[in-house]
Image (spheres, rainbow, N blue to C red):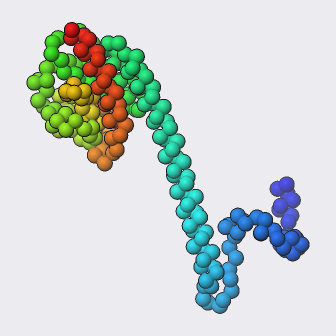
Amino acid sequence: MSEQLKQLTEAQVAEFLQAHPDFFTRNVKLLEKLHVPHETGRAVSLVERQTTVLREKNQNLTSHLSDLIDIARHNDVQFEKTKRMVLALLEAETLDDIAVAIDESLCQDFASDTTSLILFTHKPLDVNNLRLMMRDDANVINGLIGTNLPSCGRLSSAENEFIFADEAVKVQSAAVVPLVQGETLGLLSVGSFDPNYFTSSQGTVLLSYVGEVLSRVAYRILRQQEH
């Protein structure tokens, strides 16, 4: 087929089009890619200008559609990752189960570098993979949990050290999610060694959703273990 195309001459193309005058009527899309100047001397004809504008609009729409498809695919992937995290949280029976589910999901699925889960308790509990403390011992992060809203960006040095401890020196940006269920339960923090990974302009819909699920699960288990 490629050899036949190479041997095809302009005369043969012209002869074919003469024999099939309705060819472009049946193949309209080809006109979008063809450049057919309309001779009007030095001036550009209205027909040629309109054709150029329509072709540019078509290219822009095609590019926009491609972007929308990419965004939809990205959202599908994010949804699947979030679903796995939520299911793991719903299956948690202990506070350690919660910590493991959060760490595995955020570090593996969402490619964060480190996580920190701080929960407030009224009495000592035996846990290994998260930090429990009295609410009054967490005044350093009052500014993060006072709004009850997730936020992204850079933390202050004091907040960073309090939340990430030994990892603080490497954490350059973070996302923090206050955990609230009638009362403030604690703080989920996700840290990155990249200063541009979490920025203040990022959306927080996903973080809010994770925070709501985690708050309900943590509240249930905390109250069970405290009684």
The answer to whether residue 193 shows anywhere in this view is no
Residue visible at 40% across and 25% down in the picture: 86
Q: Nearer the viewer, residue 36 or 223?
A: 223
The answer to whether residue 55 shows anywhere in this view is yes
The C terminus: image quadrant: top left
Residue visible at 35% across and 34% down in the picture: 209
Residue visible at 33% across and 35% down in the picture: 207
Q: Which residue of the protein is positioned furthest toward the front in this rendering?
A: 182
Q: Is residue 45 above or below residue 182?
A: below
Residue visible at 35% across and 31% down in the picture: 210
- Left or right, 167 with respect to 78, comes to left
Q: Residue 176 location in percent, x, y?
A: 26, 34
Q: Residue 56 location in percent, x, y?
A: 57, 68
Q: Nearer the viewer, residue 53 or 13?
A: 53
Q: Is residue 123 above or below residue 37?
A: above
Q: Nearer the viewer, residue 17 or 4?
A: 17
Q: Is residue 127 above or below residue 171?
A: above
- Left or right, 211 with respect to 68, comes to left
Q: Is residue 56 above or below residue 203?
A: below
The quadrant in which residue 219 appears is top left
The N terminus: image quadrant: bottom right
Q: Residue 89 location in percent, x, y?
A: 38, 21
The quadrant in which residue 190 appears is top left
The quadrant in which residue 170 appears is top left
Q: Residue 182 location in percent, x, y?
A: 22, 27
